[in-house]
Amino acid sequence: MDQQFLHYVVPDSPAVDARMPALHKIDLITVRLPFVKPFSTSVHTWAVKEALLLRLESGGVVGWGECVADPDPYYASETTQTVRHIFKEFLLPLLTRGQTIGELLKRWSPVRGHGMAKAMVENALLDLIARQQSRPLHELLGLPARRIQSGISLGIQDSIPALLDAVAEAMSRPYHRVKLKIMQGKDVEWVRAVREAYPKLTLMADANGDYRLEHAALLRELDAFSLTMIEQPLSYSDIVQHAALQRELATPLCLDESIHDLDDARSALALKACRVINIKQGRVGGMIESLRIAALCQHAGIDVWSGGMDETGIGRAFNLQLQTAPGFTLPGDTSETARYFNEDIVEPAVVLADDGFIALPDGAGTGVAILEDRVARYTLAREQIR
Ligand SMILES: [Mg+2]
């Protein structure tokens, strides 16, 4: 075991010293936006995006957070209902004016897990504070502006020809990499077909935990296709068995679902369970914990990227701001808005430049304007808490 990763003290973002303003209005809003096309993983198919939004208002300034939990537990154990419960009963009572974000995160630490609930609140607070200070979020986090690499994630398709069509459509835009979802029975031959059609494409595969260690020989066949990585081949909660699998594969493994916080990342690196980590800020408790994980990985010489949860424009904007951190060296899941929604609840939409990069939106906080009339149009439920 590599002890250095267990003992490395990560530097913190200056945003931990930001102070919480008084919150005059707090709303939990559930929106439902139809996807342009349903999205399938090895576990489930989603036809709509149902998202829980947190709207915080202080002195006429509004900050927004988006929870990445689904209404169902088919990506993670948290759901929009568990997030509502944990927020109202355990996180909200600890929100007091004047404390720093760092102090708040410490006060939340007895709440075990529930990273998606914590991220929603931390996101909304950071956005609110940055908007109050009229600065972009990345600046509050101590990060310089830069353009962001793009990537696209293609869900499980019905047939190999349908997959090749989906890849062709993706490649009509200048994405920096293509990710294929795979599952048992839709893996080696499917990846082979794509690789034969596109020999030079930057390509990776994501299994969302569909395999077990007994499938190591089959997964080893994927070594023939020069994938940049295989993401989360084994159980959603496992680290140790991934270490055993990584020893058998030439292709780097990437952990996604298994990494809930900095401690999980330490364990994964110490055990050499992966050579890449997919940091979803909405899953690991927010932007500050994400930056800690990115700093640890950078110290370890491990590449990271920002995964997507098919967020609305609010969550997508946080993912863009996060990727200004220097450790984010690989293209992530950030795609154009038009791929997911005909109409989003923010402006401007994410679009790729001719070279495939994405410019940060130009404004305070996350930089996007939230269109409250559209939020209202897609609202299923709104609960005014204060
Ligand atoms: Mg994944």
Image: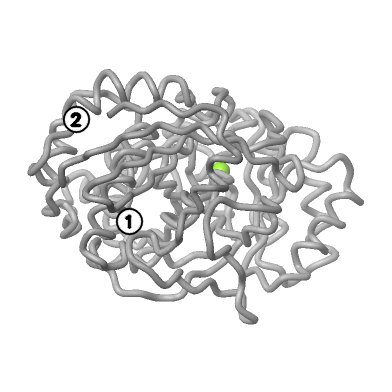
The crowd level at tag 1 (other Cα within 10 Å; few <14, some 14-19, many 20+) is many
Residue, x 49% and y 65% (percent of image)? 330
311 shown above or below 170: above
The image quadrant that residue 251 belongs to is bottom right
Q: Is mark 2 within 8 Å of ligand 1?
A: no
Residue 267 seen in render: no
SS state under label 1:
helix
Q: Is residue 5 left or right of residue 115?
A: left
Image coords of residue 101 (percent x, y)? 16, 45
The total of numbered circles placed on residues is: 2
Q: Position of residue 3 (x, y in %)?
A: 22, 45
Q: Amino acid at mark 1?
A: Ala
Task: Name the outermost residue toward the right.
Answer: 161
Q: Which mark is residue 368?
A: none
Amino acid type at image mark 2:
Ser
Instruction: Give the class, few, some or many, for how many residues have Cα within 10 Å of label 2's Cα (few <14, many ≥20).
Output: few
Please name whichever residue, 199 or 39, is drawn nearer the observer in this view of the structure. Answer: 39
Which image quarter is the C terminus in?
top left
Closer-to-camera residue (20/169): 20
Residue at the image position 38 percent from the left and 38 percent from the top: 54
Residue at the spot x=43%, y=34% of the render?
Answer: 239
Q: Where is 80 relative to 217, above or below?
A: above
- Point out residue 183 in the picture as x, y percentages from the top left corner: 72, 36
Q: SS of the residue at dot 2?
A: loop
Q: Quadrant of the N terminus?
A: top left
Q: Earlier in the sequence, mark 1 or mark 2?
A: 2
* Residue hosting label 2: 109
- Ligand 1 position by quadrant: top right
Q: Nearer the viewer, mark 1 or mark 2?
A: 2
Give left or right: position of 163 versus 65: right
Look at 44% across and 67% down and name the residue there.
329
Q: Which mark is residue 294?
A: 1
